[in-house]
Amino acid sequence: MLNATWLETFTVLCETRHFTQTAERLNMTQPGVSQHLRKLEQQVGQTLISRQGKSFTLTPAGEAVFKLGFSRRAEEAELRDAIATDSPNNGSVQVACSGSFAMMLYPLLLPWMCASPNLSVHLTAAPQAEIRAGLLEGRFDLGVLGADPRHARLEAKPLGREELCLVMPAGTIPPVSFADLEALGFIAHPDGYHYADDLLRLNFPNDYPGAERLRLRSSVNQIGQIPAPVAEGVGYTLLPRSGVEAFAERAKLSVVQLPKRRWHDLWLVFRRGRQLSARLRYARGVIEEAASQLR
């Protein structure tokens, strides 16, 4: 890598075409300018100027190095401007969360994106283990997890909690028995069996046979489509509140409150010691707003 100080001295020399003026501009001596030129030529391995009395012309190598020096100066100026402004509306943001939370969060991010053409927001719906790994590897800037990861390189802030819901067709009148659920049939999804063991076992301890023995009516692995059969009167399912509220036909669903309720914690997680940029602080605010709608 070329020495940045020698390269800048040479760039100024190419602009002034005069050793004395270069020394004055850089607050150096004329022999100092000549020394920087010699060291840069040694580093490049080629002569950069062709002297003609008190003037000089650039060699082909000199022209290439001057172009590089001018380009690096522009890049450095651009970098300094970016650091100085730290605008919330420029740059890239990588956020990861559950599929249900993503459905609620993304519409809240859209107005920010519409108003910020230089902003790039990437929202990834992923399992908890993938979010944690992505945060540690630097692939995600911010993540929403269901528990404090308690990792030395991660910092976690509580966002609140969201309820695990029994979702049934609109018009369902509680109380609901386990026999009522079996008559409808379960709409399964990747997290559904875990949710069943969590909520149904708690409320129907004498009747619940285990998730693997539930009467299965259908299975869906697309988070946005899980409530669709329930909305049409086909089966019941179990989802976090965010997955219910984000469903387009929410009016066709009933959230039936069971005697014993369950909530899942929500934690905002990012790499420990990282100073959040303006855009990440703004994204954090939008995530907190989404979480507040679940209380």
Image: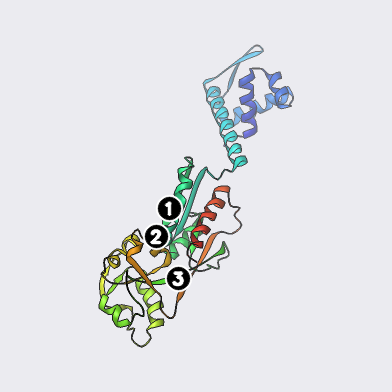
- Is 17 left or right of 91, judged from the image as shown? right
Of pointers 3 and 2, the one earlier in the residue sequence: 3
Residue that label 1 marks:
107
Q: Could you tell me if the residues under marks 3 and 2 are in contact, i.e. CB atoms within 8 Å?
A: no
Label pair 1/2, CB-CB below 8 angstroms: yes
Which residue position is annotated with label 3? 163
Instruction: Give me the residue at 52% from left, 25% from top.
Output: 64
Q: Nearer the viewer, residue 218 or 68?
A: 218
| Location of mark 2 (residue) | 246
* Callout 1 amino acid: Pro
Horizontal and vertical percent for residue 190?
34, 68
Q: Amino acid at mark 3?
A: Glu
Q: Quadrant location of residue 174?
A: bottom left
Measuring from the top left, give residue 282's x and y in whole percent.
55, 51
Q: Secondary structure at mark 1?
A: helix
Mark 1 to mark 2 CA distance (whole Å):
9 Å
